[in-house]
Structures are given as C-alpha cells and as structure tokens.
Image (cartoon, rainbow, N blue to C red):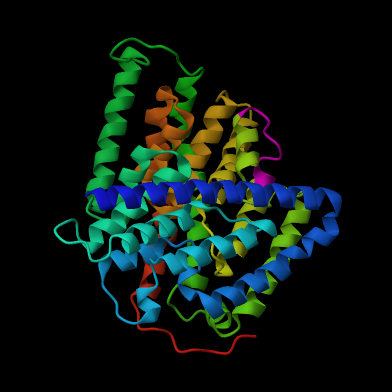
C-alpha cells in the first residue's frame, strides 16, 4: 500500500506541474498574440501539423484526450508495443510535450483528459508487478480518477467519474433514474420549504426559482449543442469509414494543417477569444462580464472541434466548459429573470453533460467548482436534460466510442504527408 501511496503522490505532483506548465504556455501565447497577432495566427496550422507528425511518428498512443486509452487499458491487457503503451511513463511524457506545444500555438484544448492519462500511466508504471494489492484494472481506474480530481481540484468528481465513466459499474439506466428521483424530490422540497439546509441557510442564490424554471431549457439547448460536438468527433475520430475519417487516417499531417487553418479563422472571427483552454473567458462570464455570449460559444465550439478532430494530444473538458458558459450567457442576456451567473453555470453543466454524456460527473464538477449549494438541484436537472438531449443525436458516449479504436488490432501503417 505504501508503494501505491507514493505513486499517487508523484501522480498528484505531476498533475500540478503539468497544470502550471499549461498556464505558462497559454500566457506566452497571449503575449505573442498581443505583440504580433497575424504572425501568431500562423502558429496554429504549423503547430497543428508538427504536433500531428510528432504524435504519429513517436507516440500514437498519446493522441486525443487520453481518456479512451485509459478506458480500453482498464478493460483488457494487450501485448506488444502499440497496445502496451496506452498508459505508460513514455506516453505520459509525450502527452505533456505535444499538448504543451498545441497550447503554445493557441489550440483550443484542455489539460484534463491528458491529466487522466498521465496520472494513470504513472500509477500503472510505478506499481507494476505489485503483489497482494489491487489489480491492474483497479490501479488504472484509480489513476484516471485521481487525474480528474487533480485537474479540476474536485476530489468528489474524480470518484464519480471513475464510477460513471471509467468503471461503468453504475448502469446507465439506473444512473438516469437516480438523478431524476433526486431532482424531483429536491424540487418538491424546495417548493415547499425554500432553500432549506439542515443547520440553517447560510446564503441563498438570488432568483433561485428562475434557475429551477430555466434549467430544463438551458439543459436542452446545451445538451443538443454538446451532442452535436460528440457526433462530429465520433464521425471523424471513431472506427467508422466516413470520408473525413479515412482522409485523416491516410493524411494525418495534412488534415491537421487544414484544422489549424480552420482554428485560425475562428480565432479571427472571435477577436482572439478561442485560443487555449478557455478558462479566462469562462471565468469572465461567471463574474458578470458576459462578452459575446452565443457568438463566442459558436466560435469556441468550432475551434474546439478543429483541435479535437485533428487527433492532437489534448482534452475537451475545459473547452466544453467555456463553450457552455457562452450558451448560458446567451440566456442571461435575454432578460428573462435568471441571474447571469446561474445561467452560465447551468450552461456549462448541460453542455458538458451533452459532450461526455456523464450527467453525474458534469453536475458534481460544477458543484465543486462553484461551491453554491443553492444550485445543486438545478445543476442536476440541467445535466439530466442535457444528457437526454445529447442522446437524441448520438446514442453512445464519446469516450466509449473512441475507446473502440484502442480495442482493435494495431492499425496498418500508412504514409504520412
């Protein structure tokens, strides 16, 4: 057990260091863009192309968010280099290096998915051969959960994510029923007693009734928008034979270069708001600086799609939160009575639930991030509706669709151009 604890400490330290590195690289890009905007825009297609070549040449297991690799690695043991490198120190190192390059170039990616793969790789590598302790699957799942907790500073969400997504022991139908019953019971209690708390209400969100009323509508829009994002990713990155997917597999560098041009175009349209993970833009919306709302959400959506379908190492969690914040801000500016901050938080929850189809994880992450107990019920309602709406567009959660790529035999090598 001491060996597992030591590995977990190193994993947490690596996650913290990676977070700090990402912040520094995004700050460097902001400075470069302020000094020479048009020259900096060229970094997107060039950087995407270089990152795609490095990934293809040295670390194909480091592509994408990393969560599908962790899911597949937890499910089955593979032999050989290609399968065996899904969660290792080598892959973790390449993940950090190439995703850092993408952030330096302004790519709309997050560090949360990569952190899951990095921490899972550290724990798996440093506990290999352990006798009498948890099995390989448990170690990988625990490492992935620790990655989520470290990336967002949300330990409860890490546990929920492990149960809901990595382990898949919380059966989907039961998941939906539990949330639905909790939401209905919570709404009934609120309607009768107000914002009741066992030891008394210490603080109450203004306009909480409006949050309850608008949660289903925001959840519907955010979920449909998030489901569309997942559908595009599944079409291009999944194991199917869509023409775009075939072109990406045959010409990964060229495809990534085109994606970089697309990302640069939407960066121009948004006035530079689509660069990086989107943390600053989402935070600005949360503190009542709504920015461009729906137009920002659209541009961030497109920039995030461009970065994701290129197959570059990088996550989708943080860009999804930023996109969802834009969706919520658009509702806030309609003047319908819902508080701006509440609408933004509900937008983030519903869009994230639509993208990853993990409503519990989405709701708990935002609960821990915002620490507003009054919004717990509306958050869960928005996440539930968002998950349902996303299911109308794509039936299978995106991470499990992409995990199929890592359960298949190693791909036949193709030319890189």
Residue 312 in view: yes
Image height check: is 232 above or below 208? Answer: below
* Predominant SS along the magenta part: loop
Quadrant for residue 248, please give it.
bottom right
Residue 387 in view: no
User: Closest to the observer: 347 or 192?
Assistant: 347
Residue at left 45%, top 47%? 13
> Relative to residue 170, is residue 42 drawn left or right?
right
Residue 3 position in % (x across, y down) = 27, 53
User: Closest to the observer: 15 or 202?
Assistant: 15
User: Closest to the observer: 173 or 265?
Assistant: 265
Residue 406 position in % (x across, y down) = 37, 73
Query: Residues in magenta?
Result: 287-296
Residue at left 59%, top 69%? 310
Question: Is residue 188 inside the magenta stretch?
Answer: no
Image height check: is 391 above or below 381? Answer: below
> Relative to residue 178, is residue 241 drawn left or right?
right
Residue 124 position in % (x across, y down) = 32, 61
């Amino acid at each position: 057990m001491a060996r597992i604890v030591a590995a977990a400490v190193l994993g947490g330290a690596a996650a913290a260091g990676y977070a700090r590195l990402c912040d520094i690289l995004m700050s460097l890009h902001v400075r470069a863009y302020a000094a020479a905007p048009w020259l900096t825009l060229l970094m997107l297609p060039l950087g995407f192309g270089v990152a795609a070549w490095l990934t293809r040449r040295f670390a194909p297991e480091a592509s994408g968010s990393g969560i599908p690799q962790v899911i597949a690695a937890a499910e089955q043991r593979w032999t050989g280099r290609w399968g065996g490198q899904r969660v290792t120190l080598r892959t973790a190192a390449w993940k950090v290096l190439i995703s850092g390059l993408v952030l330096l170039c302004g790519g709309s990616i997050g560090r949360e998915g990569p952190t899951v793969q990095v921490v899972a790789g550290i724990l798996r590598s440093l506990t290999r051969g352990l006798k009498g302790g948890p099995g390989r699957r448990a170690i990988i799942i625990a490492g992935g959960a620790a990655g989520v907790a470290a990336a967002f500073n949300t330990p409860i969400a890490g546990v929920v994510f492990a149960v809901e997504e990595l382990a898949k022991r919380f059966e989907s139908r039961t998941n939906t029923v539990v949330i639905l019953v909790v939401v209905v019971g919570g709404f009934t209690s609120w309607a009768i007693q107000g914002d009741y708390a066992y030891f008394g209400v210490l603080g109450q969100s203004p306009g909480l009734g409006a949050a309850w009323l608008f949660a289903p509508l925001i959840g519907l829009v955010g979920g449909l928008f998030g489901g569309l994002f997942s559908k595009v990713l599944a079409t291009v990155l999944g194991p199917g034979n869509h023409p775009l997917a075939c072109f990406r597999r045959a010409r990964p560098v060229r495809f990534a270069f085109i994606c970089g041009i697309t990302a640069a175009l939407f960066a121009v349209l948004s006035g530079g708001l689509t660069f990086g993970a989107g943390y600053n833009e989402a935070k600005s919306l949360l503190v009542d600086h709504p920015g461009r709302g729906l137009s920002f959400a659209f541009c961030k959506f497109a920039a995030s799609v461009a970065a994701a379908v290129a197959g570059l190492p990088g996550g989708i969690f943080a860009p999804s939160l930023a996109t969802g914040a834009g969706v919520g801000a658009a509702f806030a500016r309609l003047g319908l009575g819902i508080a701006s901050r509440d609408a933004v938080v509900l937008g983030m929850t519903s869009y994230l639930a639509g993208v990853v189809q993990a409503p519990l994880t989405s709701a708990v992450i935002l609960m821990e991030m915002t620490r507003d107990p009054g919004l717990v019920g509306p958050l869960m309602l928005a996440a539930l509706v968002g998950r349902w709406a996303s299911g109308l567009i794509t039936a299978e959660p995106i991470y499990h669709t992409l995990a199929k790529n890592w359960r298949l035999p190693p791909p036949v090598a193709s030319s890189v151009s």
